[in-house]
Image (tube, rainbow, N blue to C red):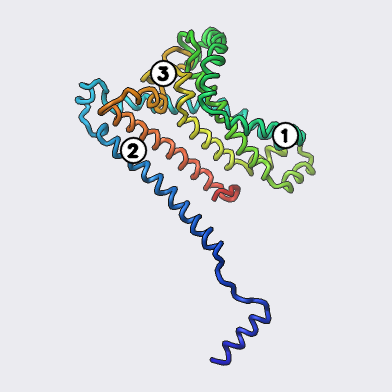
């Protein structure tokens, strides 16, 4: 045995397989990476614990006591706000997703290189604009400009339930809010979709073109199937941004605590984030706990959206580098 070990070491040395010691940089990087991952989980758990603890009084207090103090039963109060949050975000997605995918395809497969670079920089710059600026633009520019469109839609398309009712005279409707949110989430969806489209295999694209496919047929057969999981992820990230947006919605939307599918009237459902921003400065007592409890509901909604996105991406793991 004693003669075998030196022989093995000499053969390994002659083959160039010299064992190396772990480097300090590798250990530091591994520690930082592990610590960062643990820190994210700890912060998320602390946020959830804070929301649950501060929301507990509002969730457990007798509804009659809440009604006597003018707050109302919690679930009947928060469900219209949750509806308004989801309703405005869905409207933003309906408006933003087709435009974002179209811009991303234009940048990645149609535009000349210089134009594509400039347009890409412009889209990325749009993501850096503060939300309060979008809110001011929405209330002072967009809302008055959309009043004639509101009137036209209710006059000629009023038979459709979404566009029925008396149009708002100020333009501060859920429709205007959805447009502002669509502009805000457009850079997120566009940037992610552009990067995913650029990762499509060139061999697949060239094979489709060689078989006589037009450029659109090549995109439909080779690019979009490859990018489907990435598109879903981009849409879900944009939805998360729209669900949690506060200042722009608070400035633009004239909201009330109601459930209403009409998008052009003066009576609109409010959102959770906007309601917290507008009501928290004057809140006290159980009202603070009730607002924090509504924040817990928003936290659960956004967490569910992200979990749904991860599940959809995981179903097509062969097309996604996120796993």
Q: Earlier in the sequence, mark 3 or mark 2?
A: 2
Examine the image and state in which quarter residue 64 appears. Answer: top left
Residue at the disc numbered 1: 116
**Disc 3 or disc 2, which is closer to the eye?**
2
Q: Nearer the viewer, residue 272 or 314?
A: 272
* The label number, if any, that marks residue 255 in the structure image: 3
CA gap, disc 1 and disc 2: 44 Å
- Across and down, in percent, residue 256 comes to 38, 18
- Across and down, in percent, residue 244 comes to 45, 31
* The label number, if any, that marks residue 51 in the structure image: 2
- Across and down, in percent, residue 277 comes to 40, 25
* Position of residue 221 in the picture relative to residue 293 (left or right): right
- For the point 51% across and 19% down, the residue is 175
- For the point 44% across and 12% down, the residue is 266
* Position of residue 201 in the picture relative to residue 243 (left or right): right
Q: Are marks 1 and 2 in contact (CB under 8 Å)?
A: no
């Amino acid at each position: 045995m004693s003669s075998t070990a030196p022989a093995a070491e000499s053969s390994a040395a002659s083959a160039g397989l010299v064992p190396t010691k772990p480097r300090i940089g590798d250990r530091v990087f591994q520690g930082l990476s592990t610590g960062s991952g643990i820190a994210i989980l700890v912060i998320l758990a602390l946020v959830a614990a804070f929301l649950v603890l501060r929301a507990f009084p509002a969730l457990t207090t007798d509804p009659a006591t809440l009604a006597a103090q003018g707050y109302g039963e919690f679930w009947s109060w928060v469900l219209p706000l949750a509806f308004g949050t989801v309703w405005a975000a869905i409207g933003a997605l309906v408006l933003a997703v087709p435009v974002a995918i179209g811009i991303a395809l234009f940048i990645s497969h149609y535009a000349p290189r210089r134009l594509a670079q400039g347009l890409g920089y412009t889209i990325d710059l749009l993501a850096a604009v503060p939300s309060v600026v979008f809110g001011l633009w929405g209330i002072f520019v967009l809302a008055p400009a959309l009043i004639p469109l509101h009137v036209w839609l209710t006059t000629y398309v009023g038979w459709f339930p979404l566009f029925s009712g008396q149009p708002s005279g100020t333009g501060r409707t859920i429709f205007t809010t959805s447009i502002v949110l669509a502009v805000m989430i457009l850079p997120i969806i566009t940037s992610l979709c552009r990067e995913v489209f650029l990762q499509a295999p060139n061999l697949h694209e060239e094979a489709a073109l060689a078989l006589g496919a037009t450029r659109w047929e090549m995109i439909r057969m080779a690019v979009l199937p490859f990018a489907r999981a990435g598109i879903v992820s981009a849409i879900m990230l944009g939805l998360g941004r729209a669900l949690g947006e506060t200042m722009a919605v608070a400035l633009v939307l004239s909201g009330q605590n109601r459930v209403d599918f009409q998008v052009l009237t003066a009576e609109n459902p409010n959102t959770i984030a906007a309601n917290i921003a507008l009501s928290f400065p004057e809140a006290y007592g159980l009202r603070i706990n009730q607002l924090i409890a509504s924040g817990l509901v928003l936290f659960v909604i956004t967490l569910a959206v992200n979990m749904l996105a991860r599940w959809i991406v995981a179903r097509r793991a062969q097309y996604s580098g996120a796993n």
